[in-house]
Image (cartoon, rainbow, N blue to C red):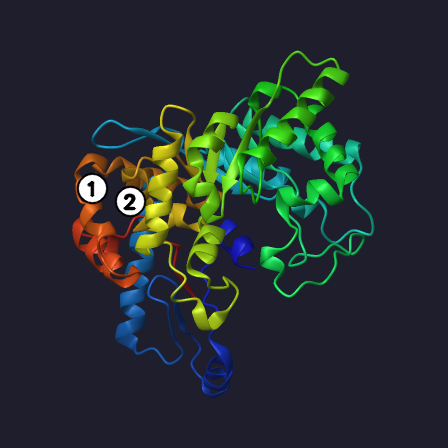
Amino acid sequence: MAILARARGIPCLVAMRQALLEAAHEASHESVILDAEAGCLALKPTPMQLAEMVERIEARRQQAETARAAAHEPATTLDGRTIEVCANIGGAEEARLAAASGADGVGLLRSEFLFLERDSAPDEESQCKEYQAALTALNGKPVIIRTLDIGADKQLPYLRLPTVPNPALGVRGVRLWQSQPELLETQLRALLGVTPLKALHIMLPMVSEAAELREVRQRLEALAAELGLSERPRLGAMIEVPSAALCAASLADEADFLSIGTNDLTQYTLAMDREDPALASRADVLHPAVLRLIQATVAGAAKRCPVGVCGSAASDELAAPLLVALGVDELSVEPARIPAVKAALRRLDTAALAANIPELLALPDAVSVRLRLGELLALDDEASPITTPLARC
């Protein structure tokens, strides 16, 4: 739900529990205020609150118009770094939206959406058609397609994996290669059927060591030779587990690119289930431990391959500037956020922020980092650049 809401720029609050239902039952006002930026829902707003919100919505609208006007221009920071701002999408329809929104490419196409809500796995032809439509929509810009990321935590009706005590630590992502070789080989064949192959980037999820990447590359090479292909797509790995971040150098020797999945990296680093509402406020990418792993990834990949971020941190108003200051080359966000993210990056001095990284990493927790980072960036709550649009109900 969160992924779909972000893709459409819809503000929402989650994990509000029974108190929300009880309060909503008592509410009698025609208007309420849903403030996703502050995490507040006002069921009985005063006339003054409503007036202030109308002003904020109008200010956001004007900012959005200005950002959209320059959305197709590069995102170059004040100190001269150009950052690619790409799109996270679920299929060809969103690829067209991404192109219209000014995306520099696709940083993550979640191929699992092709496999969900079906009675059988999609065949090679139907997969290839969907992948090709995405590449066509981006007109030669890079498109990163993640191979099937399914496990016991995300079951398919035609692929019932064994129930395990902790599915997040079980057979999922690239680990499926061993138990479901035909499923993944069909997907690789479908991917190799698109044109131009030079625009295709294949990304493997849940990689924990270089040997996993090497094995898939060998199979990809064999299939390409079998099909008589002279070109090869780029092959990369997601950095989602601490072992991958700490061994980024060896992964970068095998990979053409790395992409940090901050949602899972945060979950595995802090041992906090990302779907547990009781831990939602504490599972924060700005925890110093997570930031140190991101820093290690960038350092390990230096001069070997580029590093992007495709997790939700890429569009976080505080985390995104810090990610760029840490050395990340690309941010991938929902299509609706691309213009605002680009606009914010153009106002960022990454070198100045980078000078404060040692101080930030020395702080004890995510709360402290957010507070200090907010001070450093001098964020104005009335003009925060990378936030979800407000809505009035």
Q: Is residue 224 left or right of residue 345?
A: right
Residue at image mark 2: 322
Q: Quadrant of residue 260?
A: top left
* Quadrant, the C terminus: bottom left
Callouts 1 and 2 close, C-beta under 8 Å: yes
Q: Which is nearer the N-term, disc 1 or disc 2?
A: 2
Relative to residue 282, is residue 313 depicted above or below?
A: above
Asked whether residue 254 is in view, the answer is yes
Relative to residue 154, is residue 197 depicted above or below?
A: above
Q: Nearer the viewer, residue 322 or 266?
A: 266
Q: Quadrant of residue 190?
A: top right
Helix, strand or loop for disc 1: helix
Residue in the picture at 31% in, 65% down: 53
**Residue 66 on image: x %, y %:** 32, 40
* Quadrant, the N terminus: bottom right
Residue at image mark 1: 353
**Residue 341 on image: x %, y %:** 36, 42
Residue in the picture at 50% in, 86% down: 25
Q: Amino acid at mark 1?
A: Leu
